Amino acid sequence: MYKRNRLIAVATVIFAGLIYLFAWSPVFTVRSIETAGVPAEVSSQSIIDRSQISIGAKLSRIEPRASEKALRQLSWIKDVSISRNWFNGKVVVTLSPRKAVGLYKGKAIDSQGVLFTLPGATPQGLPVVSASTPELGLRAISLFTNLSPDIRENLISLSAANESSISSWQQWEGRTVKVMWGSADQVDLKVSVLKALLAQPENKSITRVDLSAPHAPIVK
């Protein structure tokens, strides 16, 4: 009985010592904080501040899930993870930013249809999409990404009334042309037909091209 009580007492002392070591002693504290995946337009310090992790904090008292939740309130962050190194006291905050594929209703939209606020300046070359839903906007963007570079560079805006009614406004040799693409299918064929039509002298003054049926296009 005495031996058993002695073992319990020793175990209690060890347990209390471990609690002190991890929760109260200066041994396991945050000595450095690093960030990864932060866009150039965003300061690493602003991310650290939002995570609410500071130098000197006890590693055991850091709540990664709470810090990750606070960072995910920034809509441009797709994912975030926080790691702690108990040996050197380093905390690493790793971000995965969303990638904009277009602009929809004044916000950026990613490939999954999530709307978010860009952390910096709007990248060049993003299509401006008008559609009733983000899903329709993505259909229009999917067509845009399959267009040839010269067509993309001269695109003013995209709109989608439904999946089979996608259109764009294009700048072409000093004039504005509305192109009705129809669906996002047969894009290569539709681009070839569009270029052939615009190259014909008799079409120098047209302002609309309907490519919904690329084998029977309509010009106005």
Image: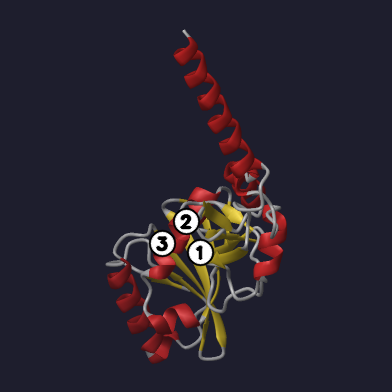
Disc with the residue nearer the chain's start (1 vs 2): 1
Sort mark 2 into few (<14), some (14-19) or many (20+) by Cα contacts within 10 Å. many
Distance of label 3 from label 1 (alpha carbons): 14 Å
Label 1 close to label 2 by CB (< 8 Å): no
| Circle 1 residues within 10 Å: few <14, some 14–19, many ≥20 | some
Which residue lies at the image location 56% right of the left edge and 86% below the top edge? 175
Q: How is the image coloured?
A: secondary structure
Residue type at mark 1 is Lys
Q: Which x, y percent locates residue 55? A: 69, 60
Nearest the eye: 69 or 197: 69
For the residue pair 119 and 51, the one nearer the viewer reads as 51
Residue 97 visible from this viewpoint? no
Q: Is residue 98 above or below residue 67?
A: below
Residue lying at 66% horizontally and 62% vertically, measured from the top left: 47
The residue at the far front in this view is: 2
Specify which label sits upstream in the sequence, 3 or 1: 1
User: Could you give the CA–CA distance between mark 2 and mark 3, rounded to whole angstroms?
Assistant: 6 Å
Tell me the number on the disc at residue 99: 1
Q: Is residue 24 above or below residue 207?
A: above
**Percent coordinates x, y for residue 65 in the rendering:** 58, 42
Q: Which mark is nearer the camera, 3 or 1?
A: 1
Which residue was labeled with disc 3?
A: 142
Element at label 1: loop
Q: State if disc 3 and disc 2 touch (CB < 8 Å).
A: yes
Q: Amino acid at mark 3?
A: Ser
Q: Is residue 211 left or right of residue 88?
A: left
32 and 50: which is toward the camera: 32
User: Please, what is the three-letter code of the amino acid marked with disc 2?
Assistant: Leu
Residue 63 location, x and y as percent?
62, 43
Reading the image, the residue beneath label 2 is 138
